[in-house]
Image (cartoon, coloured by chain):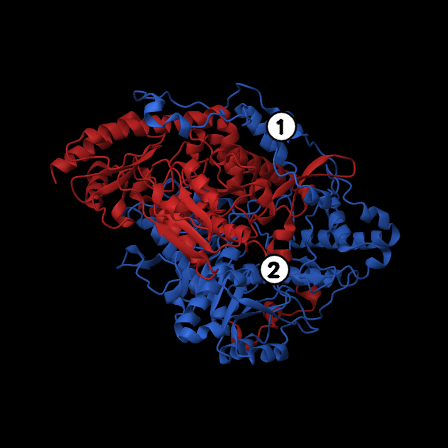
Chain colours: A blue, B red
Amino acid sequence: MTTEITKVTTHLSHNEQLIFERSHKGRIGYRLPGLDVEETPLDQLVPAELRRDDDLEGMPEVSEVDVIRHFVRMSTWNYSIDLGMYPLGSCTMKYNSRLNERVARIPGFANLHPLTEEHDAQGALEVIYELQEHLAEITGLPGISLQPAAGAHGEMTGIMIIRAFLDARDGATASTRRTMLIPDSAHGTNPASAHLSGFSVKTIRSTASGLTDLDHLRELCAQGDVAGLMLTNPNTLGLFERNIKQICNIVHEAGGLVYMDGANMNALVGVARPGDMGVDVIHLNLHKTFSTPHGGGGPGCGPCCCTKELEPFLPVPRIVKNGADSFKLDYDQPRSIGRVKAFFGNYGMMLRALSYTLTHGNDGLREATEAAVLNARYIANGLTSDYDKPFDDPPMHEVVFTDKRQTRKGVHTLDIAKRLIDYGFHPMTIYFPLIVQGAMLIEPTESVGRQELDQFIAAMKSIAAEALADPELVLNAPHNTRIGRLDEAAAARKPVLRWKPKQAASAG
Amino acid sequence: MLDSLGIKSVDELFASIPEDLRLPRPLNTPAALSEIELLTKFERLGSRNAAAGRPSFLGGGAYSHYIPTIVDHIISRSEFFTAYTPYQPEISQGTLQTIFEFQTLVCQLTGMEVANASMYDGSTGLAEAVLMAERVTRRSKVVASTTVHPQYLEVVKTYVQHAGIDLELTNFDEQSGLAGSSLAAAVDDQTAALVVQSPNFFGCIEDLKALATAAHAKGALLIVAITEAISLGLLKSPGACGADIVVAEGQSFGVPLSFGGPYVGLFATLEKYARQIPGRLVGEAFDKKGRRGFVLTLATREQHIRREKATSNICTNEGLIALAATVYLETMGRQGIQEVAHQCVQKAAYAAKEIGKLAGFSLPFSGPRFNEFVVRGPSAAAHLLSRLADEKSIEGGLALSRFVPGRANDFLVCVTETNTREEIDALVAGLSSIAKHA
């Protein structure tokens, strides 16, 4: 098998203005049927002072072909999973099956109104119920709500559940327990979500080997104000927290609960279950582990899964079984934290995730986990000779390297990432986790084969060689994109966040 | 591959997981289905959603509008739907320019100065707006009218329960169906914001100007929520009325009903509050050669940098749905948005007039309407609507008893450009005959 690096070449890439700059007065791209009812003078329906008088000045006036070319041209400026490996650590960019897309578009679901009476939406409710059952089995946590719309939203839901549980358990004394412990390697969403639930945050150190520092955890738990711990496992360094059971025990004995950030659950599906580790509540990212498309930044779906004990606090409505083949919405949950989103959540994502679960089957789900870990391990092995690997433990589904060796020549993580673009790969996650200086977090997922892994490794090795021999080449990358590095600092100093017509721009 | 790693079995890959934590058995989920079996299963489940195929007059926060064919084609392109959040601008300009256009379109429609890259939906957008008002004013009281969508109010309650915000609700005017003077009267100098929806949950169009004046007189903000975004094609923009924050559900812009999601939240405000906005923002930037591009900007507001001091815990937007809304708005364009809005208001007026003529039926609220209105029937609305569905195969609307106590006979009817006159006439005839044979 050959491992030729396939560098990007220039290809047809059209320039394309903003749609507003393409607009021509009077041009249209739609047609509606004529109005088939008698027209009532508008003044009789909506008084003039409540109607707009700007004739939607500035909105685009374009034809259908204009719109198609506009978006197709812009689309060619994007990198995508379908184009190649997208090794963003922690983001889990795996293949998005077209079959799942087809399922989500079945008219019986796509055209179903969320306020339809239960008995006319039984199929839709059954999908939710069935997915809940599978997620409960996969996580080992029986209480499920699919309502949260994203990982951070599921996280907020989970932390609110902890808050509600503690308030119910401890009554007035719960107010002395308002500290949430978060490792220094955590996702930034963790502290932000804790804050939304009224917790203050204390940071736990990681050990030199990249795991939670148990002594520091004990020390913080001894202070008596700990409501809980938010822990990512495998953690953001790609390492399994092997002391997880002990960690859970320490927190539980201190009266707190353990929340697991399930962003990395794709390293565990079919292999180990958070519920068996002592975790009380977790969120999943259906857009990571269960392959629903990332869509350029959403929509996601962030189910919250918890123990029986915490179940009464889940958002309403719950979707429950009501006899053999019948499902209903249960609002009668007086201890619920309430609703976190209108209707039932990002339902279309639930259809896709159920489709993923069923097409993989139980053995396929585990195989995906195995392949994801194997691929990361292969990259870890392939790059150690050229890049600094700060932790010795073998990684799970993602591996962290640093730019330590390259900085001697003035080449940093950002430069390596940008140079990778010239080789036809999307860069890895950079400068995260924050505790690793110059971090490069690489997650190949199960959706790449050995040949592509070898190409990626070869590209990274080649960049390491370039950094030694010709650092300028790397520092000025990317060279083959239609646009160079953009001045983000200038953009933030004087933000231009919308298009304005020329004359208005100069006036304002 | 295992050999190259010096590993003998797949199990060794998981050596860092203690033995007693590993699942000793296969998952108890179903065995793999083929494509044919899977589609058969989902087609069967889809067919158990009888309501999806019927003429429908259900609104109440989710609307059935025509979706031009090209919307689904464009959002199905690999380059859009299999891309991530645009962290690497050199290879994400398609997504970034689209969001910049989306932000511009939201500003144009709402009459506001800045808009973000989108929120999860209208309801969570409203909750974030309330939190933002507290940040901006450093006041802790928020007053909302009960004419705001009941589920939106529930979401706001959940979000503010630990945020030190005191949420007060005011009743609406029974005669007009409007938030009216009780909302304006509730503002005091401790109030961070007044929250109003227009058209409101009952379909009535609020006097936003008067509410803005009342809020501003006490140094409070006016937050306007919109569930039926097509109304922006006809109604005076909240910005022109003096709103400080506008949130809207963007589902009406080319997004299928899909049993409640994924939808897309629109979020817009004034320039002076740009650094207090939750969520992602895209701004213009230039490279060394002076070529224009777009980047995620003002990231110092966000959780990955600010951690617990961030303006919000949000780290994604609803990218693909924002794209759908952008394609919809650009395809329908300046003229199309107005025509859809015009057809909605006219068809709803026709339906209201015809239903109002029926013996035993009346329209309890006098406030001006867009495309939804409350009908008072002669008997329990839930029963009436359920018979209409079973016997006439029409989804006649939403029984208000599901949300508002003491309104057993009332139901909310929504009419859009997709409802033909024939359907409206069938609804009217159906209501009449079922009421007669109650």
Mark 2 or 1: the one toward you: 1
The answer to the question of whether label 2 and label 1 lie on touching residues, with beta carbons closer than 8 A, is no
Q: Nearer the viewer, residue A330 or A233?
A: A330
Q: Nearer the viewer, residue B269 or A73?
A: B269
Q: Which mark is residue B414?
A: none
| Residue A384: x %, y % from top left | 76, 63
| Residue A468: x %, y % from top left | 86, 55
Q: Nearer the viewer, residue B167 or A55?
A: B167
| Residue A223: x %, y % from top left | 56, 79
Label 1 sits on residue: A504
Q: Residue at x 56, y 60 (%)?
A: A192
Secondary structure, mark 1, is helix
Which chain is mark 1 on?
A: A
| Residue at the far right in the pictured view | A469
In the displayed structure image, the side of residue B60 where residue A506 appears, left or right: right
In the rendered image of this protein, does residue B171 appear above or below residue A67?
A: below
Whole-Å distance between the Cαs marked 2 and 1? 37 Å
In the displayed structure image, the side of residue A328 where residue B99 appears, left or right: right
Q: Looking at the rendering, in which quadrant would you find the C terminus of chain A?
A: top right
Q: Which mark is residue B307?
A: 2
Q: Quadrant of residue B8?
A: bottom right
Q: Residue at x 46, y 62 (%)?
A: B162
Secondary structure, mark 2, is helix
Q: Residue at x 33, y 64 (%)?
A: A334
Is residue A343 visible from the viewing direction of this image?
no
| Residue at the far top in the pictured view | A26
| Residue A43: x %, y % from top left | 35, 23
